[in-house]
Image (cartoon, rainbow, N blue to C red):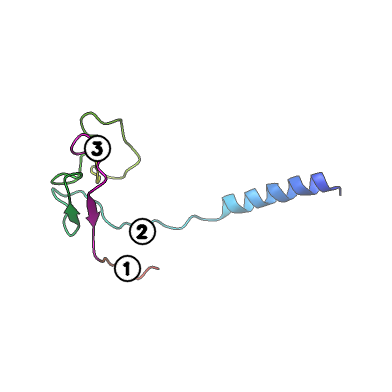
Amino acid sequence: MNKPVLLVLTAWLSFGLAAAAPAAEDILIADFEGKDYGAWKVEGEAFGPGPARGTLKGQMHGDGFLGKALVNSYFTGVWCTTASCRRSAWATAGRR
């Protein structure tokens, strides 16, 4: 077998094996479906009083999040870089 055919065959097999491998299961850290941020500590004005229910006024359309709400740093109408939203620790149900 010559080298170009072997290279194509190797690439094809590698792609096929990678595509067949199951993806790791996502681990939900928080759902942000409540009225406020719950156990998460929010500092600054960027995130507002609670999770946004989708795209905010004046913001480009956003999607790709699960549920009805998300943490959105566009609350004041401009992108803010001096705010934080964090949680000190959480359980992951014994997963690593």
Image location (x, y in percent) of residue 1:
86, 49
Q: Earlier in the sequence, mark 3 or mark 2?
A: 2
Amino acid type, callout 1 = Ala
Left or right: where 6 falls relative to 14: right
Specify the quadrant of the image occupied by residue 59. Answer: top left
Residue at the spot x=20%, y=48% of the render?
Answer: 33
* Residue at disc 3, secondary structure: loop
Question: Crowding at label 2, few (<14), some or many (≥20) Cα neighbours within 10 Å?
Answer: few
* Structural crowding at the residue carrying mark 1, measured as other residues with C-alpha within 10 Å and reported as few (<14), some (14–19) or many (≥20): few
Q: Which mark is residue 27?
A: 2
Percent of width and height locating residue 20 = 58, 52
Q: Main secondary structure of the magenta part?
A: loop
Q: Image quadrant for the C terminus?
A: bottom left
* Proximity of marks 2 and 1: CB atoms separated by less than 8 Å: yes
Q: Is residue 77 above or below residue 46?
A: above
Q: Tell which of 41 and 2 is nearer to you.
A: 41
Residue holding disc 1: 93
